């Protein structure tokens, strides 16, 4: 069993509220909120205002993925009654330890994301402080990309490090996750699967969420 976090980047923005309501009713565990600034990644998505409006319909917590430069400037904006995780990119933080403390000081859980080219060693010295490590299995910026298989090995290694040291962060994977590759990801040690297209483009969203979460 793992948790499922549909990414609303793949939702229909013209009826975002209804799409969010639907995935809440379909058994999803988190709403994965992809925030892009057009600088850290080559795309712009939406900001805290949109996310705050969704508090009116969301009945499950937010898992906020900040793909933005110098995220400390915006942490407070994303703290809402539905926000459980706020995740920043290691590559976007000059003082990662401070940023983790900043997120935690707001009462939210702190996550750190690693791009496909960033090795685990880059977060080794904060593994005892984080609540989540997000392994990117695509280069961030767009939904609907192809899964990079090396992420699987990275998750296995991270899971071994967690086990060996008694750490308690959760492992999340994001990018190209689908109902076929999800079993291997779960066996490798993934706790939360992010899925954009695999949920929102599915003919039956409820079934997709159920299969992913099994
Ligand atoms: C990529 C985003 C992902 C993306 C996932 O930059 O962080 O969350 O929306 O979409 P799929 O599941 O379609 O790869
Ligand atoms: Zn994401």
Image (cartoon, rainbow, N blue to C red):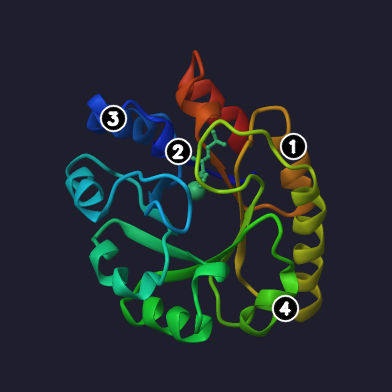
- Answer whether labels 4 and 1 touch (C-beta < 8 Å): no
- Answer whether labels 1 and 3 touch (C-beta < 8 Å): no
Query: What residue sits right under mark 2 in the picture?
Result: 28
First-in-chain label (1 vs 3) = 3
Q: Which mark is residue 101?
A: none
In three-dimensional space, the C-alpha distance between marks 4 and 2, rounded to whole angstroms, equals: 28 Å
Compared with residue 154, is residue 121 higher up or lower down, i.e. above or below?
A: below
Query: What residue sits right under mark 3 in the picture?
Result: 13
Compared with residue 196, is residue 194 higher up or lower down, i.e. above or below?
A: below
Residue at position x 39%, y 51% in the image: 38
Query: What residue sits right under mark 4 in the picture?
Result: 166
Residue at position x 35%, y 44% in the image: 45
First-in-chain label (3 vs 2) = 3
Residue at position x 33%, y 59% in the image: 83
The image quadrant of residue 135 is bottom right
Q: Secondary structure at mark 3?
A: helix
39 vs 188, left or right, is: left
Q: Secondary structure at mark 2?
A: loop
In three-dimensional space, the C-alpha distance between marks 4 and 1, rounded to whole angstroms, equals: 24 Å
119 vs 206, left or right, is: right
Q: Secondary structure at mark 1?
A: helix
Q: Quadrant of the C terminus?
A: top right
């Amino acid at each position: 069993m793992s948790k499922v976090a549909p990414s609303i980047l793949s939702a229909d923005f013209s009826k975002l509220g209804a799409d969010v309501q639907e995935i809440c009713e379909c058994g999803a565990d988190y709403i994965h909120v992809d925030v892009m600034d057009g600088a850290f990644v080559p795309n712009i998505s939406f900001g805290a205002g949109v996310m705050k409006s969704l508090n009116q319909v969301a009945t499950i917590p937010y898992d906020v993925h900040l793909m933005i430069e110098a995220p400390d400037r915006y942490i407070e904006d994303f703290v809402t009654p539905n926000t459980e995780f706020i995740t920043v990119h290691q590559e976007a933080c000059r003082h990662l330890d401070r940023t983790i403390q900043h997120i935690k000081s707001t009462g939210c859980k702190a996550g750190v994301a690693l791009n496909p080219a960033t090795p685990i060693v880059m977060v080794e010295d904060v593994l005892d402080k984080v609540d989540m490590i997000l392994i990117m299995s695509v280069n961030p910026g767009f939904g609907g990309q192809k899964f990079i298989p090396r992420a699987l090995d990275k998750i296995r290694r991270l899971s071994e490090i967690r086990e060996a040291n008694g750490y308690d962060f959760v492992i999340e994977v994001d990018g190209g996750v689908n109902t076929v590759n999800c079993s291997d990801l779960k066996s490798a040690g993934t706790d939360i699967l992010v899925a954009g297209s695999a949920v929102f483009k599915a003919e039956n969203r409820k079934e997709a969420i159920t299969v992913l979460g099994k």
